[in-house]
Amino acid sequence: MTAIRNKDVAEMLEGIADLLELKGDSIYRIAAYREAARRIDSMTEDIANIDAEGRLEEIPGVGPSISAKIDEYLRTGHLGYLDSLGKQVAPGLAELLRVPGLGARRAELVNKELGIKSVAELVEAAREHRLDKLPGIREKMEEKILREALRVTQRTKRLLLGVALPAAEEVVGLLRDHPAVKRIDPAGSIRRMKETIGDIDILVASDRPKDVMEAFTTLPIAREVLAKGTTRASILTEANLQIDIRVIKPEEYGSALQYFSGSKSHNIALRELAIRRGLKLSEYGLFDDRSDKRLGGRTEEEIYEILGLDWMPPELRENRGEIEAALEHRLPKLVEEKDILGDLHLHTKWSDGSDTVEAMVEAAIKRGYKYAAITDHSRSLGVAGGLSDEEVREQRRLIEGLQDKYAPFRILHGSEVNIRTDGNLDYDEETLRLFDIVTVSIHGGFGQTREKIDGRISSALRHPLTRVLNHPTGRLIGKRTGYAVDLEEVLKLAARMDTAVEINAQPDRLDLDDIWARRAKQLGVMGAIDSDAHSTGHLGFMRYGVAVARRGWLEKKDVLNALPLNRLLSRLHSSKKAA
DNA sequence: GCCGTTTTCGGCCCGACTGTTTTCAGTCG
């Protein structure tokens, strides 16, 4: 059995909340389960560890009742309470909650009156106009339910940040110079640089909303205008992406930007803090609760300041301790893209890249880097054109020959060495010693047991020449969950071996993710933020890796490739600590 | 069910939209 993870526990708690909602239980009890679920979902530490040490109730939002349920669930894989709750609610009701517009009340109504117990049956009933006979539902509501139910059955997946962000930036770029636009920013999860995005939301400050609406809905990239009101509009772009815009009065822009940037959990915590201070925070501003006097809202900075907090980058706003840190003026100074001095994971035509060593080096120089590592695949990765021992020597001669041409830029000769299914590295010691930097990756045997994978990674990390563990979970967002691996143990070993762990910046990898990047930092592991570029155009993926690092609270000092060249070289040359 | 700068009891974020109402319930973010 694979271990129960934080995400499973969070889903279990959400399931309880859904069932309680259907039962018509106290909205505060329901909110308590949802809050606990949110907290646990975004925690960095493995909940099984916390439980084993009897510290569940130290988690904010977890008290005696929820902690007992988590403990039972972790120990047995089941929860008696959940089973008995399930029996009290008509089967299929929980599924109906997935339809936006159908909450507990309406779900219960259609179930009770029409016997509907699945989304498919709901669609059928709506088509046959059986819903509009029900109290509180008329034609329009029936249409809306049908529309939403159909969308659930063909649910559009969340967008990768690497798709959503460029689309948002294109719109921002097109509207920025419009005379009616005073300020414009992407908001929502894009601004927080989350790995996947639900909706693309853009905020505009303007005194002339009508002009902004007009400019937005007539953009050349707008294929279809889905909605157009006085301060809000939606378009479908040529790339089939929905983009929403809303126009805000300039004096309310800060509070609106703060509100629409989220996260929801961060906003709730912020509003609770405001209440404790006798204030009231909404998207319209920060107010004195008694007099309703408006104290601020033009900028985000003044809102945070009045609340007694340091302003914080949106990447931190997940209610993972950033509010407490801001109160105590101990927010991290997050790593920035300009701190990155080199890229340590680049492919060329020698293996499965599409550009030459020279082209990749020139692209790195153009980005302002001081160094870069060429890390083509190793010999056993035939599909990716892995280099034979002889080709490694050839490539080394080429790179040595290029050094003078590009000095003082430094080309590091590296390799992305395959960790074979038996845990051995793909070259013998003699060849490995030729490289300036050895990085290691799992590329095969994904179906192996957790023990096998752990063993492979462990032996690769213990190899005295290994300097970076690449894409540690092997996941592809939305496509592949990655291999079974005990990351907590891997990171602890990496810390002991003084080996860096990659934050792979490919938009569909982002591996480590933000949660584990933060755990790595806590354990004292250096992060290597790499583009894993297979062409010159991919070097720009670096920004997504930096975003993950920032969401993981990493600072410049936590990042291997933010080190100046001389310090990086001395690290690469030093022999590793004994295992 | 959780929690504490007034609290171990009595609160719990805030506002908008939609569709259905004639003053509001349900849902969402």
Image: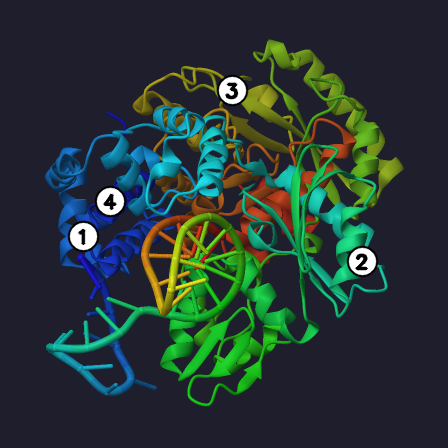
Number of the front mark, 2 or 1: 2
Mark 4, residue position: A22
> Which residue is outermost to the right?
A405
Measured in 3D between alpha carbons, the distance from the residue under mark 1 to the one under mark 4, in whole angstroms, is 19 Å
Q: Which residue is depicted at the point 12% across and 42% down? A: A81
Number of the front mark, 2 or 3: 2
**Nearer-N-terminus badge (2/3):** 2
Depicted A297 relative to depicted A377: above or below: below
Mark 1, residue position: A66
Q: Residue A174 at x, y = what percent? A: 82, 50
**Nearer-N-terminus badge (4/2):** 4
In the rendered structure, which amino acid carries the disc numbered 4?
A: Leu
Disc 2 is placed on an element classified as loop
Q: Does label 3 lie on the same chain as label 4?
A: yes
The numbered dot on residue A176 is 2
Q: Does label 1 lie on the same chain as label 2?
A: yes
In the rendered structure, which amino acid carries the disc numbered 1?
A: Ile
Please state which of residues A53 and B29 is positioned toward the viewer in this rendering.
Answer: B29
In the rendered structure, which amino acid carries the disc numbered 3?
A: His
Depicted A268 relative to depicted A366: above or below: below
Disc 4 is placed on an element classified as helix
Number of the front mark, 3 or 1: 1
Number of the front mark, 1 or 4: 4
**Nearer-N-terminus badge (1/4):** 4
Q: Residue A367 at x, y = what percent? A: 79, 45
